[in-house]
């Protein structure tokens, strides 16, 4: 039987029992709709989590620290680092060397210090942190009050909302106001010789320019923004604080930090008061390059850490979630397959004489099977297409209701629903396959009919 004749005959048979076939097709559509709605929810949640993590700097960041800072903290650390190994200092030279590695977008240090801030004649103590320009793209600044820093070295600051409420019960009124920052500035001591120094005994002529002096300073900052959450700046959440300033401004202040005191007591400290960093955050241009960059940093003699393993576990979690959502969504489609079997079996009983005539005219068992398969496939295709449309509409309703609830809780809306093209094609294809499988038994039963007995059937 030609494909064209087969299609016309199948379409005519479907039209003759329109109500019954329409209800069967609707059952398939409901099953596909539940499958699409559940999987679209899983895909949407995965995309939301991936977007949030990517904007937080977790996917593309590596935390780098000196192995000097890891020694002496626990038995495991002492075993891991031999005493004879000379660990490299994490200084500006090392920073520039890491920045020249392939696929590295930027390298910036952690600058975070406690400070006294004065507003309206009152003193407040808070943790001040420097933020790089790339922090502008992080999700913490979505929907913030005010604006981000106007320039990398602008004398501006952004307040965390809880600290802003300490300054003023109406945080929005602080925008444009001045905040006075008091801090301790670090001044390296000039080089001296051991003959002139009474601090320790050494060979004459040895440069001993270790240490620094501390000078109290103050800086006026203009408040330009207020954020609800603390913006992290890397896998360790560096940058967390209550007051945020541009990173370049924070570096220019030369504020005394913890590593400065550690360097004073180190006999291996370099002279001249060279700047040492407690840690550096390395941003990679592509998250896929994180393992290679991390390995290169370790070969340079530094300790490196990234959240790559955590992201792998996250992807595994969503894969399992999608699997279970797909299984539960397929249950309705399995029920619909029983309707297909029932519809086609009833069609056999009603069309026994027609089947007998077809066989008498020369139609073989294969032609009869193909006819019933074509009818089952047509119902599956129509039900799959209708189910995708219903599932898309159901997902939109769920997404709308979720955003409505979030707005009533004073939270920003989110897209928790997504229907990619691969899901549309897979849903329609799955519906057709289930329909064809459901048509195996009715088709085989119709093909086995004896044409003589079929012609006698009334």
Image (cartoon, helix red, strand yellow):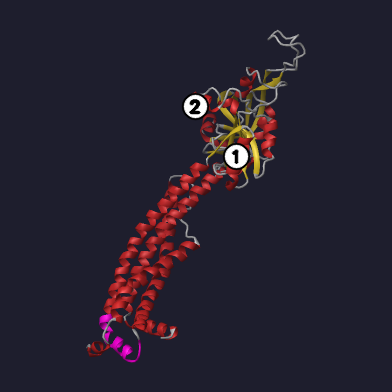
- 154 in relation to 319, above or below: above
Seen from the viewer's position, the closer of residues 130 and 412 is 130
Seen from the viewer's position, the closer of residues 393 and 47 is 47
Structural distance between the alpha carbons of marks 2 and 1: 21 Å
What is the x, y in percent for residue 28?
Answer: 35, 68
What is the x, y in percent for residue 24?
Answer: 32, 72
| Among numbered discs 2 and 1, the one appearing first in the sequence | 2
**Quadrant that contains the N terminus:** bottom left
The magenta stretch spans which residues?
Answer: 347-363
Which residue position is annotated with label 2? 76
What is the x, y in percent for residue 363?
Answer: 35, 87
What is the x, y in percent for residue 402?
Answer: 42, 52
* The stretch drawn in magenta includes residue 239: no
**Quadrant that contains the C terminus:** bottom left
Residue 145 visible in rendering: yes
Q: Quadrant location of residue 123?
A: top right
Secondary structure under the numbered disc 2 in the rendered image: helix
Residue at far top of view: 198
Question: Which mark, residue 295?
Answer: 1
- 9 in relation to 329, above or below: below
Q: Say few, some or many: other residues with alpha carbon within 10 Å of mark 2 (under 14 / 14 to 19 / 20 or more).
A: few
Secondary structure under the numbered disc 1 in the rendered image: helix
Q: Say few, some or many: other residues with alpha carbon within 10 Å of mark 1 (under 14 / 14 to 19 / 20 or more).
A: some
Q: Quadrant location of residue 374?
A: bottom left
Number of residue marks: 2
Q: Is the magenta region chiefly helix, strand or loop? A: helix
């Amino acid at each position: 039987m030609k494909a064209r004749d087969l299609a016309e005959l199948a379409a005519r048979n479907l039209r003759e029992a329109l109500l019954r076939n329409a209800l069967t097709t609707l059952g398939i559509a409901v099953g596909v709709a539940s499958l699409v709605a559940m999987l679209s929810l899983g895909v949407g949640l995965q995309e939301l989590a991936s977007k949030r993590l990517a904007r937080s700097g977790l996917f593309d960041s590596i935390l780098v620290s000196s192995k000097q800072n890891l020694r002496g903290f626990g038995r495991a650390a002492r075993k891991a680092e031999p005493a004879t190994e000379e660990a490299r200092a994490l200084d500006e030279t090392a920073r520039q060397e890491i920045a020249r590695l392939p696929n590295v977008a930027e390298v910036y240090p952690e600058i975070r210090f406690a400070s006294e801030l004065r507003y309206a004649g009152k003193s407040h103590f808070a943790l001040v942190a420097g933020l790089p320009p790339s922090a502008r793209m992080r999700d913490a600044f979505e929907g913030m009050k005010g604006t981000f820093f106007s320039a990398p070295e602008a004398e501006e600051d952004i307040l965390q909302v809880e600290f802003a409420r300490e300054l003023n019960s109406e945080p929005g009124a602080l925008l444009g106001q001045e905040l006075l920052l008091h801090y301790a500035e670090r001044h390296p001591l000039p080089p001296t010789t051991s003959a002139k120094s009474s601090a320790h005994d050494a060979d004459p002529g040895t440069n001993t320019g270790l240490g620094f002096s501390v000078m109290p300073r103050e800086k006026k900052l203009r408040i330009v923004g207020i954020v609800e959450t603390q913006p992290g700046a890397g896998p360790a959440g560096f940058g967390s604080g209550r007051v945020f300033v541009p990173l370049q401004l924070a570096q220019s202040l030369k504020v005394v930090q913890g590593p400065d005191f550690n360097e004073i007591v180190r006999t291996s400290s370099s002279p001249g008061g060279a700047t040492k960093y407690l840690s550096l955050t390395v941003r990679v241009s592509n998250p896929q390059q994180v393992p290679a960059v991390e390995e290169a940093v370790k070969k340079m003699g530094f300790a490196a850490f990234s959240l790559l393993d955590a992201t792998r576990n996250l992807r595994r979690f969503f894969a399992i979630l999608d699997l279970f959502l797909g299984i539960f969504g397929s249950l309705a489609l399995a029920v619909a397959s029983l309707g297909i079997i029932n519809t086609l079996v009833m069609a056999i009983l009603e069309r026994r004489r027609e089947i007998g005539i077809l066989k008498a005219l020369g139609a073989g068992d294969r032609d009869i099977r193909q006819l019933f398969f074509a009818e089952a496939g047509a119902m599956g295709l129509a039900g799959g297409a209708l189910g995708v449309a219903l599932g898309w509409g159901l997902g939109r309703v769920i997404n709308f209701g979720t955003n409505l609830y979030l707005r009533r809780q004073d939270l920003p809306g989110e897209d928790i629903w997504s229907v990619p093209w691969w899901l549309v094609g897979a849903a329609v294809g799955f519906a057709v396959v289930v329909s064809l499988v459901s048509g195996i038994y009715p088709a085989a039963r119709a093909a086995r009919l004896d044409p003589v007995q079929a012609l006698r059937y009334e």
